[in-house]
Image (tube, helix red, strand yellow):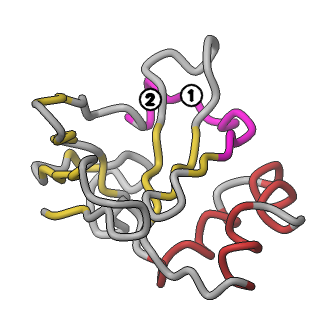
Amino acid sequence: MLPYSHQSRLKSTCKSWCISLSSGTLISLRRLRRHLSDLLCIFPKDPSISSPYLFDLGTLAYKPLPPVPCNPYVYGLCNFTTVSLGTHLYVPGGSIFETRSFPMDRPSTSFVTVLFSLAASIGTTSGKR
């Protein structure tokens, strides 16, 4: 889950993401429409099969991102799973890229679980920790 205040940081991930997110894309359009909700970042287990996605819970819009140039098995971009139960989607786990962790180029595992209520009406879909 990516809060609105941190969404501009996606551009610094790599050059291809910066180019993709700088043009008339999901984030630019959201900023123009003042839609300030969180985004769900979805990283596949096997990036050779599918690219990562950004999903806007408020508008139910998604945008595929270019492949990440680093090795996801080394950097642990997929240390999470999803569980669907009724109208709820649980996303436990993930990675925290913390500059204070050792070694510095490897993420720490997150033990946070995020709950998304898919039954809420469009524009009020919520994500809770």
Q: Residue 39 in magenta? A: no
Q: Specify the quadrant of the image occupied by residue 126.
A: bottom left
- Dot 1: within a 10 Å radius of its alpha carbon, few (fewer than 14), some, or many (20 or more) residues? few
x then y, percent, for residue 100: 29, 69
Residue 115 vs residue 77: left or right? left
Q: Regarding mark 2 in the picture, which secondary structure is present there?
A: helix
Q: For this view, does 129 lie left or right of residue 8?
A: left
Badges 2 and 1: C-beta atoms under 8 Å apart? yes
Q: Residues within 10 Å of mark 2 (few under 14, many from 20)?
A: few
- Horizontal relation, residue 105 to residue 62: left or right: left
Residue positioned 18% across, 29% down in the render: 84
Q: Tell me, for residue 45, which label it has, or none.
A: none
* Separation of marks 2 and 1 at Cα, in angstroms: 5 Å
Q: Residue 9, relative to residue 122: is it above or below? A: below
Question: Residue 117 in the image: x percent, y percent?
Answer: 21, 52
Quarter assignment of residue 12: bottom right
Question: Which residue was labeled with disc 2?
Answer: 74
The residue where tag 1 is placed is 71
Residue 19: % across, % down:
87, 58
Q: Between residue 40 and residue 95, name the one nearer to us.
A: 40
Question: Image height check: is 84 above or below 104?
Answer: above
Secondary element type, mark 1: loop
Q: Quadrant of the C terminus?
A: bottom left
Three-letter code, disc 2: Val
At 62% from the left edge and 76% from the top edge, which residue is drawn? Answer: 8
Q: Amino acid at mark 1?
A: Asn
Tell me which corner region of the image, top left, top right, bottom left or bottom right, holds residue 123: bottom left
